[in-house]
Amino acid sequence: MNRLVQGGDGREWVVRAQMDWRRPATVEDFEHDVAGSPAPGIAMLIVTVVLAVILVSWLPDGVVVPAWVIWGLLLIGLFFPMRWTLNRPWTMVAETEGDGMGEHPPERWVGFVSGMFRVRGEVIKVAKTIQRDSLPDFDGPLHPME
């Protein structure tokens, strides 16, 4: 997701967002980030599949399963993967090369936003703020980088 924005002072800004597969490590999360591997999740998935196969194989021949039961189980099974996908963290970057005359130096602002739908709104807000104020908002998700 890229946008080219003309600032109020004439500088051109590039506002972009990119999905991250892992949440960025912060100082506050250091002691709590102890997930060693995806092995527990894989083990639970295997157990769930084995139990589903056993349930289907032990089903008597005369039993008719309604369609709403199958759709309900499918919906329950897809809830957490969809939730995980839609709440991935995104890295947002707004940067400019300056005005070329030395009056305004190059700038780079970086921040993180969680959620596919929320990041789109934040990119629009940052673009409007740059057009109006020539800088991203200090109260928003972006922060200047040195």
Image: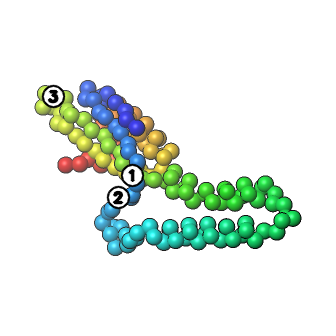
User: Which residue is rendered at x = 50% and y = 52% of the image?
Assistant: 85
Q: Are marks 1 and 3 in contact (CB under 8 Å)?
A: no
Question: In the depicted view, which residue is nearer to us: 122 or 73?
Answer: 73
In terms of sequence position, does the residue under pointer 1 or pointer 3 come before the other? 1
Identified by mark 3, the residue type is: Gly
Identified by mark 2, the residue type is: Pro
Question: In the depicted view, which residue is nearer to us: 110 or 126?
Answer: 110
* Classed neighbour count for the residue bearing mark 1: other residues with Cα under 10 Å, few (<14), some (14–19), many (≥20): few
Side of 17 relative to 145 (left or right): right
What colour-coding does the image apply? rainbow
Is residue 138 shown to the viewer in this render?
A: no
Identified by mark 1, the residue type is: Asp
Expressed as whole percent of the image width and height from the top left, the position of residue 142 reads 33, 47
Q: Secondary structure at mark 1?
A: loop
- Residue indicated by mark 3: 100
Q: CA distance from mark 1 to mark 3?
A: 32 Å
Checking the image for residue 20, the label placed there is 1
* Classed neighbour count for the residue bearing mark 2: other residues with Cα under 10 Å, few (<14), some (14–19), many (≥20): few
Q: CA distance from mark 3 to mark 2?
A: 33 Å
Q: Are marks 2 and 1 in contact (CB under 8 Å)?
A: yes
Expressed as whole percent of the image width and height from the top left, the position of residue 133 reads 32, 34
Checking the image for residue 127, the label placed there is none
Expressed as whole percent of the image width and height from the top left, the position of residue 27 reads 30, 66
Please tell me whether residue 58 is drawn above or below residue 64 in the rendered image: below
Look at discs 1 and 3 and give the one toward the viewer: 1
Look at discs 3 and 2 and give the one toward the viewer: 2
- Residue indicated by mark 2: 24
Q: Quadrant of residue 39?
A: bottom left
